[in-house]
Image (cartoon, rainbow, N blue to C red):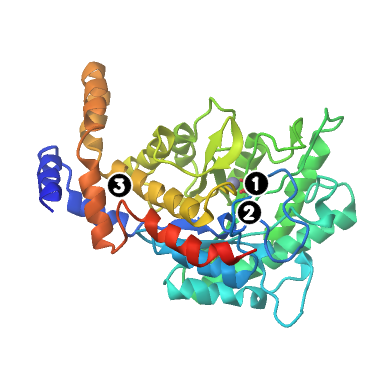
């Protein structure tokens, strides 16, 4: 407490109100992805993950069914402060009594358990059609496929997902962000880059034709390349931005989906000039779209700063998207989500107005010096205080996960 009071004073002397920062932070929703808990397997198929993305590792205790996944997610959520949304993929449909339907026939009732789960936390739900890990995705093309049967199947899946997203919003009273990502692309040099992109646009137009955008906020997520589709991605950066801009849809940027020298933190403000709302997948790419666990690194901090200092907290939907199968999955979930919260707190505790003013005045020497000095302000003391107020464990929280691993996870063999 003494530490916090000292920190509070030090920040106040720079014009930063730590109390206000904490009260803003606890209301910023961060969407927590269900797919960290089972290596993106889902419950509607037995074949595992395929289609341009990949998990690596085989740590013990992967959740094998809805009960285990929700139990694990609950454990992870108990270790994360702040407001959450729950992000569900269509392949996490829950079938009762031996029922099974294919993705084009999914209904809201197959996600009722997720609604109940979210309601326990007073949380909203986000949703994602699943255009991978499926026999109809084997060719590598789904919504852009030249095979009309395949394309039709996936359009029907997308439409079913719009209905489910609207149901989520009605049930929770919070709009549902529905993200469209496909791995559509080609391994080798294309002979026709245009036709798949035209079909892709037509398919998503059909999916969104009856979408109630007050309930369901549709996004398109771009990508630079995927595993097995290295030469051509249908939903490229330009395709996705232009589609979103011309269709009243949100562009979604995943910071693993660009050339390694490109930074999403630098792209946010460009989009904010033109889009009322945008969406993010926060991840950690290591040399490629590896989806490592989010850490408290420079880019995560910079992304948070761009949202906070541009007053865009109500215009940017923040979701996490990573999956590491090589470490304890609950710890992966919790530490990534805590780090997103840390980055947001760090941004809220930065004397942004002072720094902006130095930039506008052209005082670049002082700007550099102050930015560097601010890096060592007593951020940790405010973070610890925030955790205490949120009734979430501090530095030793890993012990809680170790206990859970010994008591629960080791039995999953
Ligand atoms: C893949 C995209 C996509 C997925 C999830 C599971 O590269 O990032 O968002 O990670 O839909
Ligand atoms: Zn993503």
Quick check: can you spot residue 261?
Answer: yes
What residue sits 82% from the left and 60% below the top? 153
Dot 3 crowding, Cα within 10 Å, few <14, some 14–19, many 20+:
many
As drawn, is 392 to the left or to the right of 17?
right
Residue 258: numbered disc: none
Which of the two discs, 2 and 3, sits closer to the camera? Answer: 2
Residue 345: numbered disc: 3
Q: Quadrant of residue 209?
A: bottom right
Q: CA distance from mark 3 to mark 1?
A: 30 Å
Q: Quadrant of residue 127?
A: bottom right
Dot 2 crowding, Cα within 10 Å, few <14, some 14–19, many 20+:
many
Q: Looking at the figure, which quarter contains the C terminus?
A: bottom right
**Disc 1: which residue:** 55
Q: Which comes before the other along the chain, label 2 or label 3?
A: 2
Q: Looking at the figure, which quarter contains the N terminus?
A: bottom left
Q: Are marks 2 and 3 in contact (CB under 8 Å)?
A: no
What residue sits 47% from the left and 35% below the top? 270
Q: Position of residue 244 (x, y in %)?
A: 60, 46
Q: Secondary structure at mark 3?
A: helix
68 or 92: which is nearer to us? 68
As drawn, is 408 to the left or to the right of 403?
right
6 or 307: which is nearer to us? 6
**Disc 2: which residue:** 39
Q: Which comes before the other along the chain, label 3 or label 1?
A: 1
What residue sits 73% from the left and 54% below the top? 131
């Amino acid at each position: 407490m003494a530490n916090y009071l000292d920190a509070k004073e030090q920040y106040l002397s720079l014009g930063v109100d730590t109390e206000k920062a904490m009260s803003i932070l606890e209301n910023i929703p961060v969407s927590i992805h269900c797919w960290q808990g089972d290596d993106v397997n889902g419950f509607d198929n037995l074949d595992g993950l395929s289609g341009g993305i990949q998990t690596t590792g085989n740590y013990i205790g992967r959740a094998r069914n809805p009960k285990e996944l929700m139990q694990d997610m609950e454990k992870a959520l108990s270790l994360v402060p702040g407001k959450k949304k729950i992000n569900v993929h269509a392949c996490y449909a829950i079938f009762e009594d031996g029922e099974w339907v294919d993705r084009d026939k999914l209904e809201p009732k197959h996600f009722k358990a997720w609604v109940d789960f979210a309601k326990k936390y007073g949380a909203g739900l986000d949703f994602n059609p699943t255009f991978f890990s499926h026999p109809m995705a084997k060719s590598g093309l789904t919504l852009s496929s030249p095979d009309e049967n395949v394309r039709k199947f996936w359009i029907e899946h997308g439409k079913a997902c719009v209905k489910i997203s609207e149901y989520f919003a009605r049930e929770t009273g919070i709009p549902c962000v529905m993200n469209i990502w496909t791995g559509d692309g080609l391994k080798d040099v294309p002979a026709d880059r245009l036709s798949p992109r035209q079909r892709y646009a037509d398919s998503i137009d059909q999916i969104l034709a009856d979408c109630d955008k007050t309930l369901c906020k549709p996004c398109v997520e771009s990508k630079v390349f995927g595993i097995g589709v290295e030469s051509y991605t249908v939903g490229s950066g330009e395709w996705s931005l232009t589609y979103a801009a011309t269709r009243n849809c949100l562009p979604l940027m995943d910071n693993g989906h660009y050339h390694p020298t490109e930074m999403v933190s630098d792209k946010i403000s460009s989009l904010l000039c033109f889009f009322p709302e945008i969406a993010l997948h926060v991840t950690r790419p290591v040399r490629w779209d590896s989806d490592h666990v989010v850490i408290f690194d420079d880019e995560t901090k910079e992304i948070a700063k761009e949202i906070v200092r541009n007053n865009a907290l109500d215009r940017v939907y923040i979701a996490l998207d990573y999956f590491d199968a090589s470490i304890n999955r609950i710890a992966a979930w919790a530490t990534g989500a805590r780090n997103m919260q840390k980055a947001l707190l760090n941004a809220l505790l930065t004397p942004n107005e002072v720094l902006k003013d130095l930039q506008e005045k052209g005082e670049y020497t002082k700007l550099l010096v102050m930015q560097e000095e601010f890096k060592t302000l007593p951020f940790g003391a405010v973070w610890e205080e925030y955790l205490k107020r949120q009734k979430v464990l501090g530095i030793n929280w890993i012990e809680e996960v170790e206990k859970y691993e010994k008591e629960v996870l080791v039995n999953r063999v």
